[in-house]
């Protein structure tokens, strides 16, 4: 329990830091809450006076009745206006809190870098930024408004009830806490339940997104039944936790309403007795004169007793909302608090040459499973470096380290003699152009996607890059050419997407290149043209080429052969073939496979 209270306290403090800049809305909500409660309390007094004006003396005082009814009507209108303005303040505060929370979560997500994305399910992260933020605002701010108004109503009605009749007021005060004890007993464990619920919801969204993204593979391998069973398993756990959480919270309101109904009945009975006991308009108990207790005052008191107990029912609902909000806030703040990449450093003066060195670099994704140990590589500026080896040997890891997606556990990487960790991150990554096997295209125009990262490029420069990447031919066939928005309705192949990514790099014209299976989705004829374009753009630039097809790296100045995170061989194609080692066996195996495929086709 202490741990939960500590977590909740930290969450409340964090949320208050987001609310603090909007004190004006908070102040407005407080003022209109006070006015709303005041008008709610004045109303019963007016219609109570109207009742006494009709039956108090046996003769109806119509002028007094009309005055009280008119005042009551004005009070109702003023109450509605105050409530509307209160809701406006609360809603404005909610919208701004949603905006700020999502902005900070998204900014933190982008600053966290590749490591965070690699270690978290995308669907779960999306749920935190979208759904959980809505739960926070719906539960916390709306609930807090109800809580504040409820507390104000309780205090105000309590004061008035003591003024009218302190004996009945004491009865109400003594009995009402019973509903609080009932609510506290029922909702004691709801925070844990709601926290589990939102966690499983994230798991469910992650699985759904994974299955939707890989639908073709699921169907191809007849894994629909497994996918459905996994979904049903997660959904069953969500159903169980959700049912337990909702059942526990649902018991709160009817239980407190029952207790409060009993209290109202007791108060009403006692009030009727006091009305009967009043003699000549005066109520005397044990020699103490309490003042007249009329039918009108009884109606006022019953209304106040109801107003007094009503917030306790609302508060029980608020407790449920707050538990859910706290659970969601904890998940959102996990994203917000994710440490970002270190982007600081000393600017590089002068043009980047491209001399790169890995100096005694050690790295592992899991401390229990070493991957790269003591890696030493020297790359001269302008060289074409090929990285080859079996799957899982560390090729992509080497690129991740070079691009500062991950930091070495030990050792350092230098560019032109400078430790890359000391170069400003934005400046450092602009030194590289990167084409990956997986093509990323935004839901924008073709021209925007080619100029991604080079927003100030002219249309002429964009078209020149497209021609160099051999993708202008299919762009011309699109309905709106370079202005075509790439949405789900635009049908372009994976190879064409990759050509657009290659055009993007050609437009950026960076001093160093990284090509990770950059032509894997392109047909042979187009690949030959692209390789020609690559040879042109790589001239004079340090280039890293990750390849499985060794035929594409025969002209590399240096081939790094990796296995189990280590560079086991390095040299030119001729040198490695002459050595007759791992590379030679790998090349001969690929050549023999290609020859068998050709003979089979012939």
Image (cartoon, rainbow, N blue to C red):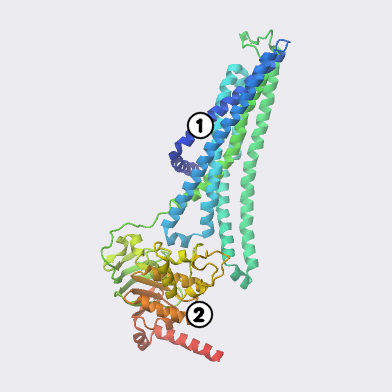
Say which quarter of the image contains residue 389. Answer: bottom left
Residue 347 located left or right of residue 327: left
**Residue at 66 percent of width and 26 percent of height:** 263
Q: Is residue 99 visible?
A: yes
Residue nearer the viewer, 262 or 148: 148
Q: Secondary structure at mark 1?
A: helix
Circle 1 is placed at which residue position? 30
Q: Which residue is mark 2?
A: 523
- Mark 1 crowd level (few <14, some 14–19, many ≥20, 10 Å Cα): some
Image coords of residue 279 (percent x, y): 69, 8
Say which element carries label 2: loop
Q: Nearer the viewer, residue 166 or 530?
A: 530
Q: Residue at x 48, y 69 (%)?
A: 439
Query: Which residue is drawn at the image coordinates 60% and 24% (left, top)?
Result: 41
Q: Nearer the viewer, mark 2 or mark 1?
A: 2
* Nearer the observer, 121 or 285: 121
Percent across and percent down for residue 449 are 46, 65
Distance between the alpha carbons at the discs numbered 2 and 1: 68 Å
- Where residue 458 sits, quadrant-wise, is bottom left
Q: Residue furthest right?
A: 58
Regarding residue 274, the answer to whether it shows in the image is no
Across and down, in percent, residue 491 comes to 56, 69
Lower sequence index among marks 2 and 1: 1
User: Which mark, by number, is residue 418?
Assistant: none
**In the image, residue 67 above or below residue 444:** above
Q: Is there CB contact under 8 Å for labels 2 and 1?
A: no
How many numbered dots are placed on residues in this image? 2
Quadrant containing the C terminus is bottom right
Given residues 54 and 294, the one toward you in this image is 54
Q: Residues within 10 Å of mark 2 (few under 14, many from 20)?
A: few
């Amino acid at each position: 329990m202490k741990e939960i209270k500590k977590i909740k306290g930290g969450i409340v403090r964090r949320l208050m830091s987001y609310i603090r800049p909007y004190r004006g809305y908070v102040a407005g909500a407080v003022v209109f809450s006070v006015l709303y409660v005041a008008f709610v309390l004045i109303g019963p007094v007016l219609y109570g006076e109207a009742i006494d004006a009709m039956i108090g003396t046996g003769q109806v005082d119509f002028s007094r009745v009309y005055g009280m009814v008119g005042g009551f009507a004005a009070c109702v209108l003023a109450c509605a206006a105050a409530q509307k303005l209160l809701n406006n303040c609360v809603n404005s505060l909610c919208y701004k809190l949603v905006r700020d929370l999502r902005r900070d979560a998204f900014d933190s997500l982008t600053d966290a870098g590749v490591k965070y994305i690699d270690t978290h399910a995308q669907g779960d992260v999306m749920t935190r930024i979208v759904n959980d933020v809505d739960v926070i605002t719906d539960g916390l701010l709306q609930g807090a408004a109800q809580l504040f108004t409820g507390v104000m109503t309780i205090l105000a009605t309590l004061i008035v009830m003591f003024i009218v009749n302190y004996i009945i007021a004491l009865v109400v005060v003594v009995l009402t806490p019973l509903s609080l004890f009932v609510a506290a007993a029922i909702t004691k464990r709801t925070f844990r339940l709601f926290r589990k619920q939102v966690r499983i919801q994230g798991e469910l969204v992650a699985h759904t997104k994974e299955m939707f993204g890989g639908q073709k593979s699921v169907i191809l391998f007849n894994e629909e039944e497994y996918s459905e069973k996994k979904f049903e398993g997660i959904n069953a756990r969500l159903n169980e936790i959700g049912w337990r959480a909702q059942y526990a919270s649902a018991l709160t309101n009817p239980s407190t309403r029952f207790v409060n109904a009993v209290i109202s009945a007791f108060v009403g009975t006692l009030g009727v007795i006091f009305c009967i006991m009043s003699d000549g308009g005066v109520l005397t108990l044990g020699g103490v004169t309490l003042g007249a207790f009329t039918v009108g005052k009884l109606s006022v008191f019953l209304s106040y007793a109801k107003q007094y107990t009503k917030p306790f029912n609302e508060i029980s609902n608020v407790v449920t909302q707050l538990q859910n909000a706290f659970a969601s806030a904890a998940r959102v703040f996990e994203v917000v608090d994710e440490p970002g990449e270190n982007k600081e450093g000393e600017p590089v003066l002068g043009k980047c040459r491209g001399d790169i060195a890995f100096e005694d670099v050690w790295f592992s994704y899991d401390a229990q499973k070493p991957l790269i140990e003591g890696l030493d590589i020297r790359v001269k500026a302008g060289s074409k470096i090929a990285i080859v080896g079996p799957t899982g040997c560390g090729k992509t890891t080497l690129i991740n380290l070079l691009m500062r997606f991950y930091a070495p556990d030990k050792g350092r990487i230098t560019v032109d003699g400078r430790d890359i960790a000391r170069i400003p991150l934005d400046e450092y990554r602009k030194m590289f152009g990167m084409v990956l096997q997986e093509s990323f295209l935004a839901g924008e125009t073709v021209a925007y996607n080619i100029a991604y990262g080079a927003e100030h490029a002219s249309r002429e420069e964009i078209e020149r890059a497209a021609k160099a990447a051999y993708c202008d031919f299919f762009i011309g066939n699109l309905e709106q050419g370079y202005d075509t928005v790439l949405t789900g309705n635009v049908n372009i192949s994976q190879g064409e997407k990759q050509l657009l990514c290659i055009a993007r790099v050609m437009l950026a014209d960076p001093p160093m290149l990284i090509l990770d299976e950059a032509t894997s989705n392109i047909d042979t004829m187009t690949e030959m043209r692209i390789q020609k374009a690559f040879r042109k753009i790589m001239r004079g630039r340090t280039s890293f080429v990750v390849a499985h097809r060794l035929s594409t790296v025969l002209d590399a100045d240096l081939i790094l052969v990796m296995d189990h995170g280590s560079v086991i061989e390095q040299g030119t194609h001729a040198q490695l073939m002459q050595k007759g080692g791992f590379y030679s066996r790998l090349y001969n195996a690929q050549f023999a496979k290609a020859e068998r495929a050709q003979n089979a086709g012939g």
